Amino acid sequence: MRTDYRCPACILKVATKEAQMLLSKDRMAFIKKVISILDKELEKAITPAHIAALRERALKEVSRNPDPYKSFKGNLMKFVSENIAPLIAKELNNLPEGYHKFRWLVLNASAINGYEIPLHGGDDIAERFMKSINRGLGIDHSESAFDLITKLDSADIISYVLDNAHELPIDLLLIKYLEGLGKTVYIFARKNPVADDVTLNEVKNHYESPYIFGLESPLGVMPDMESETNMNILKTSKLIIAKGMANYETLTELNLGIPVLHLLTVKCEVVAEHIGVNVRSPIALLRR
């Protein structure tokens, strides 16, 4: 998805929220950096994620902190793990085997993406999550995705590209379910901290798998910044499950020749128009 004329306003909106994380003496310097990035990079940027990645680099530079979101991420992951994921797992046990369990996990994985620390601050995640669940899936390709998955054998790779750290406990429910079906899931997280995205080390601290990989791309999947190994895995996968808007923005600009199941909650007008749904809609969009 290409950068739109409305994207700079959103980039700056997030920057003003992030500036509150800084010392008062550093806030204006950070905003000036972001404005400079927009001035120099807007016409060159392929997707909004490319500009957002530069904003996050500026935040690290000004804050002199390699992981500005670390405490926020840890607190929210703990909250979701203790208060939301167990309820999802309990309801999962009440559902019939097969598609109904898969769809329940897909709905929850999409709905939890509706929360962003830079925009929402960390105080009302449960309330926002329940509102997303109650809206239901604005696009629901879960049945087609499940049919595709059931036809895969254990040698076929499903690549699961993670997004925000607080989503991990719910993403792991879906990953474990797929592995329970005998599927091979390769998990991708950020190699280095960027915004509130989950990192390679954070995933490894919460889950054991021989197939956990660190993305070099600062946000989404950017082939010019990605390792050859990671790109080869993605290109040879039989299905990519991609969480969040940055992955949507970047993957829709790539022709990998394989199906991609996008699980996200739409949080801006540009993405909503590109997909054809309302803002705040959770979606399970299968692109072939």
Image: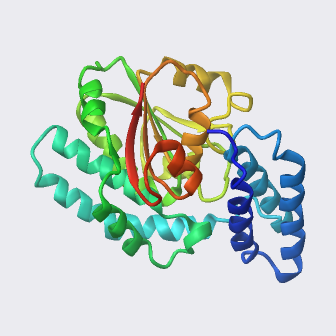
Rendered-image quadrant of the N terminus: top right
Left or right position of 102 against 225: left
Looking at the rendered structure, the number of numbered marks drawn on it comes to 0
In the image, 37 versus 197, the foreground residue is 37
Q: Can residue 189 be seen by looking at this rendering? A: no
Left or right position of 102 against 14: left
In the image, 200 versus 51, the foreground residue is 51
Report x, y in % for residue 264: 45, 50
In the image, 48 versus 270, the foreground residue is 270
Q: Determine whether 236 is above or below 86 in the image.
A: above
Instruction: Name which quarter of the figure residue 153 lies in.
Output: top left
Rendered-image quadrant of the C terminus: top left
Instruction: Name which quarter of the figure residue 169 lies in.
Output: bottom left
Q: Residue drawn at (32%, 47%), measured in percent from left and top? A: 106
Q: Residue drawn at (72%, 62%), measured in percent from left and top? A: 9
Q: Can residue 190 be seen by looking at this rendering? A: yes
Left or right position of 287 against 95: right
Report x, y in % for residue 213: 55, 35
Judged from this view, the residue extending furthest toward the bottom is: 24
Instruction: Name which quarter of the figure residue 96 lies in.
Output: top left
